[in-house]
Amino acid sequence: MTELKAFREEVRDWLEANCPEPMRHPYRSEADACWGGRDCKFQSEDQRLWLKRMAGKGWTAPTWPTEYGGGGLNREQNKVLGEELARIHARPPLESFGISMLGPALMKFGSESLKLQHLPPIVRGEIRWAQGYSEPNAGSDLASLQARADDMGDHYVLNGSKVWTSYGDLGDWMFCLVRTDFEAKKHEGISFVLFDMATPGVSTRPIKLISGKSPFTETIFENVRVEKDQVIGEVNQGWTVAKYLLTHEREMIAGSGLSRAGSIPVSKTAIHTLGTESGILHNTMLRSDIARYEMDMRCLELTIERARDEVKAGVSLGATSSMFKYYGTELNKRRYELHGDSNS
């Protein structure tokens, strides 16, 4: 505990000296989030500096091993770092599918050369990743994918398409499920590959939602060259990698229902908008709803933390990750509804 206390003081001093003051305020909109990437356009010098400093400490991926650019923190240290970031309301220095989804799969199934190639740039926010999973005619049956990678000897040639690619038009690289054995059962013969989206033959088309806007695209592959050394795990065994990655994706989605650094807590929105009487929010029904949300949010947070410990101990999550995704989505919905009630 003495060592942990010393670590907390070290973190607090470092953040005080290195977190720019403008980065200690909640997001004004989604545009304030930093996704990094080759063509990243920082909103300010403070945003660029905050990413550079945190990445330099490895604290964009604090629990990743230091040899891959991470912070090398243990569970207790990572919790302290999170608490100290929240204490000063620091914005996340980087949002990244590379950190939340690809990285864990790469560390578990990737070759050492792939880890060294891709993990450090992910930590530094130099590469923005897109996910190539869903396909136009597959629906929720992901394993029925038809995008095919034909073996050309020293490389594959990829043809097909993916749909609902989040920020596909902004991605630098893609992690993608492709069919490499066309005679195998549908859950077999799938490989997990990586490729640069600047490769000739890759194109994207926006998918507009009813709002007229959307983060989604359709991604089309026409004779795209994929190098054989960019396969994660065994060839034709990509379904195993895909399932493992999905557990982290669902945990990430579940986390969207939690209060995060960089976002305004519902209770603060209500107090700022409606005011208090004797230090208490005077709208009793709203006060009760906020309290219920914050208790449920804390329960989910603790349950996710427990599940992480179980995974480290070798226990399979099974359907738990899907439950996290569902419950986190419901919590996120309640959070937005409460923000609306607070502003009405």
Image (spheres, helix red, strand yellow):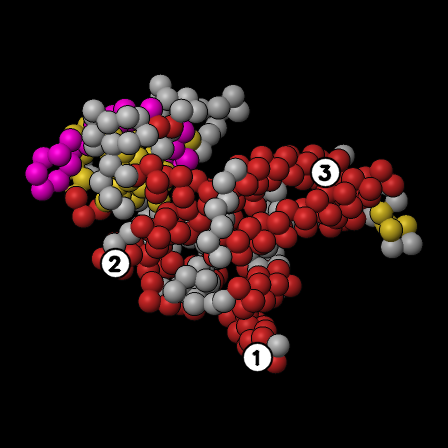
**How many numbered discs, if any?**
3
Quadrant including the N terminus: bottom right
Q: Residues within 10 Å of mark 3 (few under 14, many from 20)?
A: many
- Between circles 2 and 3, the one closer to the viewer is 2
92 relative to 322, above or below: below
Residue 56: % across, % down? 40, 67
Quadrant including the C terminus: top right
Say which label, 1 or 2, has the lower sequence index.
Answer: 1
Residue pointed to by mark 2: 112
Could you tell me which secondary element the residue under label 1 belongs to?
A: helix
Q: Nearer the viewer, residue 269 or 255?
A: 255
Residue found at x 63% / y 35%: 330
Residue 107 in view, yes or no: yes
* Residue type of the residue flagged with mark 3: Leu
Say which label, 2 or 3, has the lower sequence index.
Answer: 2
Residue 204: % across, % down? 31, 30
Q: Are marks 2 and 3 in contact (CB under 8 Å)?
A: no
* Residue type of the residue flagged with mark 1: Glu
Q: Which residues are magenta?
A: 144-168
Residue pointed to by mark 3: 338
Residue found at x 22% / y 46%: 230
- Between circles 1 and 3, the one closer to the viewer is 1
Q: Residues within 10 Å of mark 1 (few under 14, many from 20)?
A: few
Residue found at x 49% / y 67%: 74
Q: Are marks 1 and 2 in contact (CB under 8 Å)?
A: no
* Residue type of the residue flagged with mark 2: Glu
Residue pointed to by mark 1: 3
Q: Are marks 1 and 3 in contact (CB under 8 Å)?
A: no
Q: Which mark is residue 309?
A: none
277 relative to 150, above or below: below
